[in-house]
Every structure is written in structure tokens, then in C-alpha cells.
């Protein structure tokens, strides 16, 4: 009863405390980034910061460290749902690398440090007429988290996951050596890094591919009124020879949803202009839902506002924290402070609320072949009954050597997958019925394994070690761990992502 009350009225603390702190935090980082880009050159200081990391690894090796090394970043600062209880004072390394280092428009590359956020990159690139091929929606997601973990966006059906747009990585490996890895040089380490969660070394710099862009997105809304129609339209748009630049879907119930397709545009053209990024605008997923009654439509949206369309409402999680957050009066008066920082929400939630969210809340994504989309939606409906449900397509590429994810044996270059994401309160919880979160996650993981799917491990995982190795191909990972002296120096991936007993 106490926890239910704390969760229901959490907004009494979030609105007057967390929202202003979030604004001040953003202001601090804006000033800090301006200072380092202008007055205190970030590229010149990068080498010294990397040397300090190498020295820490060498020191740990020389003193015979008891616990495997990991970064000192606090778990409350991550977007992940996990609590990193393995971090201790004597096994952490400060990785203070938060800057954009260089842009090379001739080679179409941007070089950044791993702590750079997606929000930083889009603010830097778009005014220059460039963008990343894959831009995950939330501003605070970091480059290292998206590469070593999981990053996806509505353009992933063309370009793959965020890790697939990486051209080179600089990594401090287990013997404190700094190595630069590409598809040609140290290719085994390059392809093993995605989904490794820091188990192979410490990422210190990344070169990302960039592409020319236009300042607008022409977005088309396609309402669907049955599961079969949703899967048919989704597969048609994703798999056609000339697919649109962006595709995503939001299901508001098992048999109703809106699919969105979009392309870069030089100007508003003939479509209605909708600057969805303004604080007083309805949350994007609520705006999309209106097209179920309106029967579809088209709009022109400024590019950066489109990229971060789910930031203000944290997809649809903000409604659970501030139930009236999408009310016109709140948006008009305080919408400019949204969203509350996920890190501050985690820092201030306390053990009772954290346990409540683990037991009575779902935040899970699985990647499944597009041929299993209908079956997966049916399963999510039965297992979670949590809506809205997010659909995002992506190519799983065949690489040489092959990393954790791999397409089917029949696929030549890639296989089309879909991310199905459920975020919110399950139907049973909303109705006040018994709900076993661990059992529901276990069923989801078994479903993923049976359908050649993958659980996105930012979320809580119940996988055993054997099940983890059945889901993910660890052949390359194991050989790289040994070859680059990561064993015993950096914590194993499974030990990082598993749920503590």
C-alpha cells in the first residue's frame, strides 16, 4: 500500500524537484560543451585523458587487482534498468570522455569520445547539413552505450543498428595498450565489440559514418485496424526495393495502431507543417494516435525535432510518472522543462520504488525476424498486454567474422529483423490482478530463443548463463576475450547483464 501511494503521487516530488534539476543539468552541460569546444580545445586534451586510462589499467595489473575492471560511471546515470552492484572503489576507472573531436566531411566521418550523447551530435551535425544514418530517439543516450550495448532507430531497416555505422574504434585492451580497430585491422575485435558491454576493453574514441541530410522530414501516417493489416503494411514498407528513409510503428492495442514512414525533404512542400518539438505540443505518440480516427495524413516536421520525437515523453513512460503531463495546461506552463532526466529519476526513486518497477512494470525489447512479427505481437499481448507497443525494423548484417547477432543461414548479406518494445504497466497490474514479472520475462526470453530472437540487455534479464549462450553466438567473443587479454581484467558480459540473485 505504501509503495503504491509513493508511485501514484511521485509527481509531487518529480515536478517541483526533478524537473528543475534536469533543466539546470542540461544548462550546465551546454555551457561545459561550449567551453571545451571553444576556449579549451577538447581534441588536444583527448590524448592525455586516454593516457590516464591506460595508466589506471597498468596500475591495476601491477598491484594484482582483486576485482575485474569496469568504468566508474554510476548505475543511476545509465538509461539501463539494471543496478550495477559489481562496481567497487578498487575496480573502477574514470572515463571522462564527453567531447566531439573532429568532423571530416570529405571522408564523411565524425570522431567522438564515448560519452558524447545523441543530443550533442544532432545539435552539432544538422546545422552543418549532415546527420548520422542511425539516430536513436532519446537525447541522453551515449555513443558507448549504443555501440557496446544496443541502439536502433527508424532508419535501421536501411543501415542496421547503431554499431553498424561505426567505421573505427579506439580501445584500451587488457594489457593497457591502445589499439585502433576497423573492419580490416583487428577485424575480430571490431566485430566483437557490439553487445559486449565493456567486457573486451575500454572504448576511448569512435569514428562514425555521417550522411548528407535535408532540414525537414516528410512524414506519412498509416492507421491500421487489424493485426494482419499492421504486419502486411509494415513488411511492405520495410522490405520494398526503395524503402522510405524512416519506418516505425506504434500499436495502441492488438488490432489497432499507426505506422509512420518518412523521407528527408528540403522544405515543407505541400504537407502541413508540425513543429512537434515545441514544449506546448502534444506528446508525439498521442499525436500519432489521433490518426486512428482521422484516417491517416501527412506532415512536414523539422529534422531534429523528428529525431527526438520520443524524448519529451520518454516514449510513453512519462505518463506513469506525471499522469497529467500531456494535459494542455501542464504543457503550456511547464512542458519546457520536460523530460525529467532518467538518471535523476533513478537516483531519487529509492529501493521501494525500484523494486516496485521491477515487479509491476515492463521495459523490454526483443529483436525477432520479421517473418515472426505477427506471432511476436500475439505473444506480447498474452504475456504482457502492455500498450503502446513499439515496432522498429532493422537489418541484421552478415559480417566477417560474425559477432553476437547473425542472420539465418539462408540469408546472403542480411536478414530483416524487428524490434518489438513494451514499456509500461502490464494489463494485469492495471486491473489489480496478480502479476509475476520474473515469470513473464522468463517466458519472453524462452520465446526469443525459440524464434531466433535476441533480448535487448539494457533491460532486466533472467537468462541463465547457458540460455544466454544459446541466444547469443559467443564464438567470436570468447576468442577475442582470450586474444586481447581481457580475461580476468574486464568483467564478463553475462556477469554484467544478468539480474543479481
Image: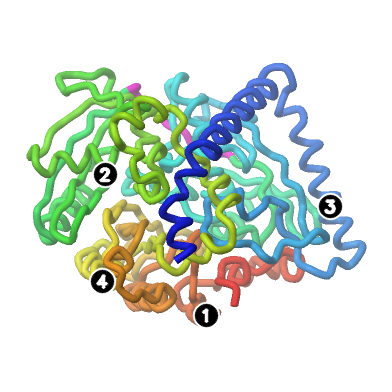
Q: Which residue is mark 2?
A: 247
Q: Which residue is mark 4?
A: 379
Residue 454 falls within the magenta-colored stretch: no
238 up-or-down from 112: above or below? below
- Distance of mark 4 from mark 3, alpha carbons? 47 Å
Tell me the SS state at disc 3: helix
Q: Quadrant of the N terminus?
A: bottom left
- Distance of mark 4 from mark 2, alpha carbons? 22 Å
Whole-percent x, y for residue 407 in the image: 37, 65
In the image, is 60 to the left or to the right of 28? right
- Distance of mark 2 from mark 3, alpha carbons? 44 Å
Q: Mark 1 or mark 2, which is nearer to you?
A: 1
Labels 1 and 2 touching (C-beta < 8 A) = no
440 up-or-down from 76: above or below? below
Which residue is outermost to the right?
Answer: 63
Question: Residue 56 — which label?
Answer: 3
Which numbered disc, 3 or 1, marks the residue that appears first in the sequence?
3
Question: Residue 437 — which label?
Answer: none
Which numbered disc, 1 or 4, marks the residue that appears first in the sequence?
4
Whole-percent x, y for residue 182 in the image: 59, 48
Q: Which residue is mark 1?
A: 464
Magenta stretch bounds: 207-215
- Distance of mark 3 from mark 1, alpha carbons? 32 Å
Q: Name the residue located 58 percent from the left edge and 39 percent from the top edge.
A: 207
Q: Nearer the viewer, residue 296 or 160?
A: 296
Q: Name the residue located 76 percent from the left edge and 27 percent from the top edge.
A: 44
In the image, is 324 to the left or to the right of 103? left
Q: Nearer the viewer, residue 438 or 245?
A: 438
Which numbered disc, 4 or 3, marks the residue that appears first in the sequence?
3
Determine if residue 242 is in view.
Answer: no
Amino acid at each position: 500500500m505504501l509503495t503504491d501511494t509513493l508511485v501514484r503521487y511521485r509527481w509531487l516530488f518529480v515536478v517541483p524537484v526533478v524537473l528543475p534539476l534536469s533543466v539546470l543539468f542540461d544548462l550546465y552541460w551546454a555551457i561545459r560543451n561550449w567551453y571545451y569546444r571553444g576556449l579549451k580545445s577538447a581534441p588536444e586534451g583527448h590524448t592525455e585523458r586516454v593516457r590516464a586510462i591506460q595508466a589506471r589499467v597498468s596500475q591495476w595489473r601491477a598491484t594484482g587487482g582483486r576485482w575485474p575492471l569496469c568504468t566508474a560511471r554510476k548505475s543511476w546515470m545509465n538509461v539501463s534498468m539494471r543496478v550495477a552492484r559489481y562496481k567497487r572503489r578498487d575496480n573502477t576507472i574514470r572515463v571522462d570522455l564527453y567531447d566531439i573531436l573532429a568532423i571530416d566531411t570529405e571522408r564523411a566521418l565524425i570522431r567522438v569520445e564515448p560519452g558524447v550523447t545523441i543530443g550533442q551530435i544532432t545539435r552539432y551535425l544538422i546545422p552543418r547539413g549532415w546527420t548520422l544514418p542511425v539516430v536513436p530517439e532519446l537525447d541522453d543516450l551515449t555513443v558507448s552505450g549504443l555501440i557496446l550495448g544496443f541502439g536502433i532507430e527508424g532508419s535501421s531497416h536501411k543501415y542496421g543498428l547503431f554499431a553498424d555505422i561505426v567505421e573505427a574504434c579506439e580501445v584500451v585492451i587488457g594489457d593497457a595498450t591502445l589499439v585502433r580497430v576497423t573492419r580490416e585491422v583487428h577485424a575480430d575485435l571490431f566485430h566483437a565489440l557490439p553487445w559486449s558491454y565493456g567486457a573486451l576493453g575500454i572504448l576511448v574514441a569512435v569514428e562514425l559514418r555521417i550522411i548528407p541530410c535535408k532540414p525537414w522530414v516528410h512524414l506519412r501516417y498509416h492507421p491500421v485496424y487489424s493485426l494482419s493489416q499492421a504486419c502486411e503494411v509494415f513488411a511492405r514498407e520495410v522490405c520494398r526495393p526503395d524503402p522510405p528513409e524512416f519506418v516505425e510503428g506504434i500499436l495502441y492495442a492488438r488490432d489497432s495502431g499507426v505506422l509512420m514512414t518518412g523521407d528527408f525533404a528540403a522544405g515543407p512542400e505541400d504537407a502541413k507543417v508540425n513543429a512537434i518539438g515545441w514544449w506546448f505540443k502534444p506528446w508525439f505518440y498521442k499525436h500519432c494516435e489521433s490518426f486512428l480516427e482521422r484516417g491517416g495524413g501527412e506532415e512536414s516536421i523539422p529534422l531534429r525535432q523528428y529525431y527526438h520525437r520520443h524524448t519529451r515523453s520518454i516514449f510513453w513512460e512519462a505518463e506513469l510518472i506525471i499522469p497529467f503531463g500531456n494535459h494542455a495546461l501542464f504543457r503550456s506552463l511547464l512542458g519546457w522543462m520536460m523530460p525529467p532526466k532518467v538518471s535523476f529519476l533513478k537516483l531519487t526513486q529509492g529501493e521501494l520504488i525500484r523494486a516496485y518497477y521491477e515487479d509491476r512494470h515492463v521495459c523490454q525489447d526483443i529483436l525477432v525476424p520479421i517473418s515472426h512479427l505477427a506471432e511476436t505481437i500475439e505473444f506480447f499481448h498474452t504475456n504482457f498486454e502492455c500498450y503502446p507497443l513499439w515496432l522498429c525494423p532493422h537489418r541484421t548484417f552478415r559480417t566477417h567474422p560474425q559477432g553476437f547477432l547473425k542472420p539465418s543461414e539462408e540469408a546472403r548479406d542480411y536478414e530483416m529483423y524487428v524490434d518489438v518494445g513494451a514499456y509500461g504497466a502490464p494489463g494485469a497490474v492495471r486491473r489489480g490482478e496478480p502479476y509475476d514479472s520474473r515469470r513473464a520475462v522468463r517466458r519472453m526470453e524462452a520465446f526469443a530463443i525459440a524464434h531466433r530472437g535476441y533480448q535487448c540487455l539494457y533491460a532486466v534479464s533472467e537468462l541463465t548463463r547457458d540460455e544466454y549462450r544459446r541466444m547469443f553466438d559467443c564464438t567470436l567473443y570468447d576468442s577475442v576475450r582470450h586474444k586481447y587479454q581481457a580475461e580476468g581484467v574486464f568483467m564478463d558480459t553475462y556477469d554484467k547483464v544478468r539480474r543479481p540473485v
